[in-house]
Amino acid sequence: MEFKTLKPIFKQLFNCLALSCASFSVFANVIMTEGHVRAMPETVPNTAAYFTLENHSDKAVNLTGVSTSVAKSAMLHTIIEEQGMVKMRHVDALGIPAHGKLTLSPTGEHVMLLGLTAPLTLNQKVELQLQFDDGEHLTISLPVLKQAEQAKTQAHQHSH
Ligand SMILES: [Cu+2]
């Protein structure tokens, strides 16, 4: 008798688990493998985010927008060299090839965080909401690190 009444509950629980697994696999098409936000002196109102995205789907996808609560605006930027001058330029989208990756780095494409609402502290986690042109969203969480620390971390990873 008691077992019978429990059955529908188990069924519901199972459906719930199956559903959350299904939605997880959709989001797993594009995943972040590493990343950080650059720590800046308190007086600097802007900073940048660098991360690597992997596209595990058969279709190329474009990163078209970023939003965050830690800054007034977040923009996709690239670095270009013009007449010996290094400049930053806003871009509308950054592409990730099918089964390929997109690497944002201090020497190239990056996410500019303009007008920080409060100074960022070391190792604080910053959440970014990424929007893609196929309608998907991905929320990533990045630690605030100094450049030197990031270099150390990368060297460590390569040695394995
Ligand atoms: Cu920039």
Image (tube, rainbow, N blue to C red):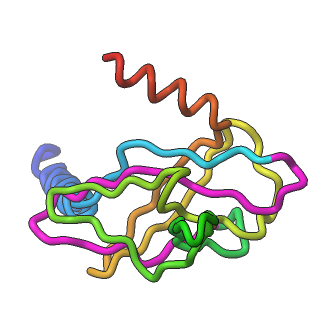
User: Quick check: 33 above or below 49?
Assistant: above
Residue sitting at x 61%, y 29% = 149
Q: Is residue 121 visible?
A: yes
Q: Quadrant of ligand 1?
A: bottom right
Nearest the viewer among 142 and 10 is 142
Q: Residue furthest right?
A: 43
Q: Is residue 16 visible?
A: no
Image quadrant where residue 116 sits: bottom right
Q: Quadrant of residue 85?
A: bottom right
Q: Position of residue 88 (x, y in %)?
A: 60, 69
Residue 140 is left or right of residue 26, and the answer is: right
Q: Is 76 situated left or right of 117 in this image?
A: left
Whether residue 109 sits left or right of residue 146 in the image: it is left
Q: Quadrant of residue 118?
A: bottom right
Q: Is residue 57 magenta?
A: yes
Q: Is residue 46 magenta?
A: yes
Residue 134 in the image: x percent, y percent? 26, 80
Residue at 72% x, 74% y: name it: 72
What span is colored magenta in the figure?
41-68
